Amino acid sequence: MKLYEYQAKEFFSKHGIKIPKSKLATDVNEVEEIAKELGKVVLKSQVLVGGRGKAGGILKAQDVSEAVEKAKELFGKDIKGFRVEKILVEEMLDIEREMYVGITLDRANKGIVIILSSVGGMDIEEIAIKHPDKISKKVVSPVWGLRDYQIRELLYESGMPKEYFKEVSSIIKKLYEIFVKYEAELTEINPLVVTRSGEILAADGRLNIDDNALYRQKEMAERRELAGSKLEIEAEEKGINYVKLDGNIGVIANGAGMSMSTMDLIYLEGGKPANFLDIGGGASAELVETSINLITSDPSVRVVFINIFGGITRCDVVAEGLIKAFNKIKIDIPVVLRLAGTNEEEGKEMIAEFMKSSDVKLYMVDTMEEGAKKAVELSGGV
């Protein structure tokens, strides 16, 4: 679960991390009132996607009238597929320096990794390329927790000026406390700014909570707001894992690993997925039918690749769902289908029987490699 910037900052502030003065606005009149109070402001669209600034989602205003004009420009704007409906109106800071601090899981090292950079304001990947000597990271054992010596090493190794040691050290501890307390997957302050008056504040903030922990994290779960494209919201409401991408091949698979592998193969063959949908294990015929509906509702999809390996999921149940969907929905685009595993023969026989009286352009394949190749071929490449 991703929190909006304004929500993340609420938690930062609650735990003693300084943030700029700001208020949330849902219409132009509210922006005007807040700008009258704060003076020069930055209007920050609240959308759950990175790169807002480059996409025109963050605008500066020198006075109230400019804030109103910029707000009119922002409200309703599409930022990478997300419609702007809320704007965080924040005081404009007089920034002297930008830094970065982030905490996430490091599964390879079975720990929590803390990343500190004495420069910030850009993606951490970009910082790593442009300023590799300014980045330091430490893996923290979840058993022993964060130690003071690890913070000292982070500060020295990142080249952090000594006058910031005390406060940045405190911010790292507070951010780590938030990460652990709320069972986060990621929390980040970028940029962590030093103003010309010497204050250190979180000018931006990210906080992503592990979905599997939300039943314990009631305070976080209450803040959940459905966001994304219309199809993503519809899928989430139905409890389906659906992600929109920017290619032209729709992907349905069962299980996260199978979904990722299927997309890897599509990329390997020179294609590009338009979306992917994970029907999980033990999918019902109704879920399969709903999934087909969702995937084919995306106008950018030119071909659908359904890749099912039946373990708990039964291939005959998947076939039943597909046949129901094909009977209800008019599908003009090709569908590549791979069915393997539990009740594979039964499923294939059902599909073969159905195809005798259907005009659906269905291509049965035996392996996922073959399926990816066929899907890319039918999509005409990207």
Image (cartoon, rainbow, N blue to C red):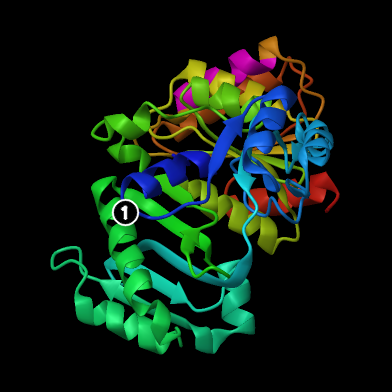
Using the image, determine if residue 200 lies above or below residue 70: below
Determine whether, in the image, residue 160 is placed left or right of residue 251.
left
For label 1, the crowd category at 10 Å Cα-Cα, with few meaning under 14, some 14 to 19 and many 20 or more, is many
Using the image, determine if residue 184 lies above or below residue 320. below
User: How far from the left and from the top, in percent, is residue 348?
Assistant: 55, 30
Q: Main secondary structure of the magenta part?
A: helix
- 308 is within the stretch colored magenta: no
Quarter of the image for residue 364 reads: top right
Residue type at the position of mark 1: Phe
Write down the region rendered in magenta: 316-326
Picture quadrant where residue 299 is located: top right
Please provide percent x and percent y for residue 285. 49, 18
Residue farthest to the left, as pictured: 144
Q: Which residue is mark 1?
A: 179
At x 46%, y 24%, the residue is: 239
Asked whether 218 or 331 is in front, the reply is: 218
Residue 35 appears anywhere in the view? yes
Number of marks present in the image shown: 1
Q: Which residue occupies the foreground of this view, 57 or 382?
A: 57
